[in-house]
Image (cartoon, helix red, strand yellow):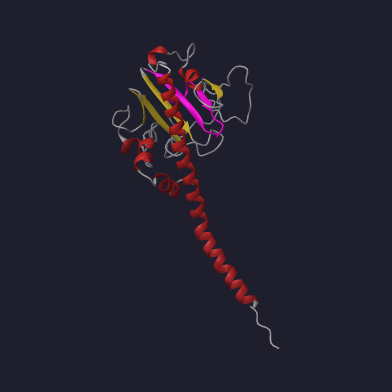
Amino acid sequence: MGKNGFTLAEVLITLGIIGVVAAMTIPTLIANTRAAQLKSRYFKSYSTITQALKLMQADDVSMDSADYSAYSNPLYKVFMRYLSAPYDCGLGGDIGAGQGNKKEVPCYKSSTGNSAIPYKSLDGKSNFNQDYLDDGQIAMQDGSLFLFENYGGRIFISVDLNGYNNKPNRAGYDLFTFQYIDGELLPMGDSRTLYPDVDKYCSLTSSSSLNGITCASKVKSDADYFKKLARVIK
């Protein structure tokens, strides 16, 4: 009785085809998965900050920038009371008093004279404007990092979606900035925010130190924002 089977050549050809298909599809699958994770984290963080601000309003807590001082009465300390299990990173990433210097906490050491690698602009060629990240930081249980700026009558809250310990640490990719205006948290790039020019400050070709700061607005208006970005930034 004869036996049917595959020859070695046929097996090798089949494996070769599978390898080619895998090489073509796996990178796309990985990029799409990463994009979906970042998108989910973006809206989760946006919701978390919005809910905390609403609770502050309900308690009649002031959100007037002038009522807070970066050192004696920082805004982020008050905001932190309305979060679930936050970790105080201090003003410029200097770990909060009494909490120890835990390396696993995703704080960004932005203090003057510190040797931490700075956040980059969206194109990756310039350092992002660190002045908007140095008035307090809060690390969350999901790994995200909230960074505050309270200066000149303006309140900015930036979010590192996956924490400072995880790359690429680029504005407009995993770092997004919002501005609190008249009781509302607005994505930077909204017409009412300090930087309304989305195309100028959310560009893969601009080397501005503010490049990426308005991308928060693009995320809200373009459902495929992260997918498009994942194709060009690895």
Q: Left of 106 or right of it: where is 70?
A: left
Residue 142, by quadrant, is: top right
Look at the image and give the residue range highlighted in magenta: 130-151
Nearest the eye: 119 or 40: 40
Q: Residue furthest left?
A: 191
- Residue drawn at (32%, 36%) of the image: 198
Q: Measuring 47% from the left and 26% from the top, which residue is drawn there? A: 147
Which residue lies most toward the bottom here?
1
Whether residue 42 is in magenta: the answer is no
Residue ID at (43%, 20%): 56
Location of the N terminus by quadrant is bottom right
Q: Answer whether residue 148 is magenta in the image.
A: yes
Point out residue 9 in the picture as x, y percentages from the top left corner.
62, 76
Q: Nearer the viewer, residue 26 or 144?
A: 144
Residue 128, above or below 78 = below
**Which residue is drawn at the image coordinates 43% and 13% (left, top)?**
68
Looking at the image, the residue that sits furthest to the front is 58
Residue 9 higher or lower than 107, as above or below: below
